[in-house]
Image (cartoon, rainbow, N blue to C red):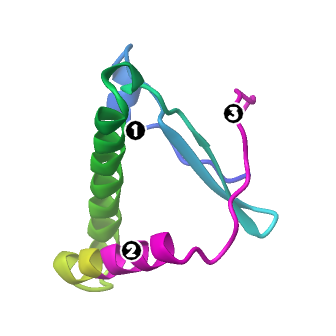
Amino acid sequence: MDALGIPPAAVRDANALELARVWIAEQGLHCSLRVGLYAADGIDRETAAWGIILADLAGHVADALSAEGLGSRADLLDALVERFNDEAAEPSSERTGGRGREAV
């Protein structure tokens, strides 16, 4: 197993929460998500929060790819958003899963 390190800020902050783990395993994408942090404020707040999280994550990916010399941040972010929208409209694979807390 090749796990990534925990960011230093998350180590320092006693109130830090892990929101997602994403793995490629058994030739597929597998993830664990912590949802519902904003559920008490309603679905609009929860979906807004996850929209911001996904956008921030895409920005970090674009930054990392740009740092690897794969293009400009703006062009890479545009390509990520385009592919995200394509995949959201027509998923390339089926998602399965359920609720619960599994040991990770």
Q: Secondary structure at mark 2?
A: helix
Task: Please tell me how crowded label 1 is: few (under 14), some (14-19), or many (20+) other residues with Cα within 10 Å.
Answer: few
Q: Which residue is mark 2?
A: 85
Tag 3 or tag 2, which sits nearer the N-term? 2
Q: Secondary structure at mark 3?
A: loop
Task: Please tell me how crowded label 3 is: few (under 14), some (14-19), or many (20+) other residues with Cα within 10 Å.
Answer: few
Amino acid type, callout 3: Arg
Task: Compute the Cα span from label 1 to label 2.
Answer: 28 Å
The range drawn in magenta is 79-104
Residue 45: which disc?
A: none
Q: Residue at x 35, y 65 (%)?
A: 61
Q: Residue at x 29, y 34 (%)?
A: 45
Task: Compute the Cα span from label 2 to label 3.
Answer: 26 Å
Residue 7: which disc?
A: 1
Q: Residue at x 73, y 47 (%)?
A: 97
Q: Secondary structure at mark 1?
A: loop
